[in-house]
Image: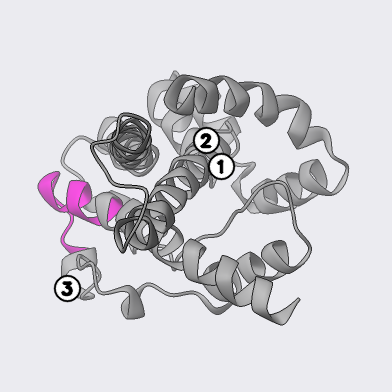
Amino acid sequence: MGEEFIVKAALYVVPLLLAVVCHEVAHGWVAEKLGDHTARLSGRITLNPFVHIDLIGTVLLPAILILTKSPFLFGWAKPVPVNFGNLRRGRRDMALVAASGPMTNLVLAGASAVVYRLIVLGLSGGVIPQTGWAPWIVVPLAQMAGISVEFNLVLMVLNLLPIPPLDGGRILVGLLPEGLAYRLARLERFGMLILVILIATGSWSQIVRPVLKAFVGLFLG
């Protein structure tokens, strides 16, 4: 069990950190371009993982999911601070800031899928030798690329659920007419509780799994 956990953790750590760190950096970078410099002043627009690591979301939860052989991996980094009041176009810019995180995960999933497919084609086509030192490098790399695809897609799909403070909820608050947006925004204090209930009852899988399965099939075949 210990050796298996170490091997899995070694394969998961880079894709997980890259996904959650880039997700948060994207929020801060887009917010800065739209008028809010809070993330920059807080030193959070950086790929240095140590300033983004959240003990629960980046360390404990993924470790528990790996240990329990969960069919999916999920996690998060410390949210990048954004002062929506500083954005030049209010709710419209808030929607763009919110959308930047999931869209970054989509791009990372696509790039990882390209790496995965190139390695698989290289091995099957004989371009990459299947003996010697090459498999010791490219096979783990392919595994990490596959993990990156799935983890980035899980992060994207879950964050796009229309529940504030998730990105999907904030996108809707930015796009809906003011009256409806205000009502949805009032749910933010209950948002994480709603998400926990959806996950605990298994209801989330009925919503997320079909979408996730379609994306994974598209990216990995």
For the residues marked 2 and 1, what is the alpha-carbon distance in whole angstroms? 4 Å
Horizontally, is 144 left or right of 129 in the view?
Answer: right
Q: Could you tell me if the residues under marks 2 and 1 are in contact, i.e. CB atoms within 8 Å?
A: yes
Identify residue type, mark 2. Answer: Gly
Q: Residues within 10 Å of mark 2 (few under 14, many from 20)?
A: many
What residue range appears in magenta? Answer: 27-38
**Helix, strand or loop at mark 3:** helix
x and y, in percent, of residue 213 in the image: 61, 25
Q: Residue at x 30, y 55 (%)?
A: 22
Against 14, is 147 above or below? above
Instruction: Give the labeled residue for mark 2.
Output: 169
Query: Count of labels shown?
Result: 3
Identify residue type, mark 1. Answer: Pro
Residue 164 is marked as 1
Q: Which quarter of the image is occupied by the N terminus?
A: bottom right
Identify residue type, mark 3. Answer: Leu
Q: Residue at x 15, y 61 (%)?
A: 37
Residue 41 is marked as 3
Q: Residues within 10 Å of mark 1 (few under 14, many from 20)?
A: many
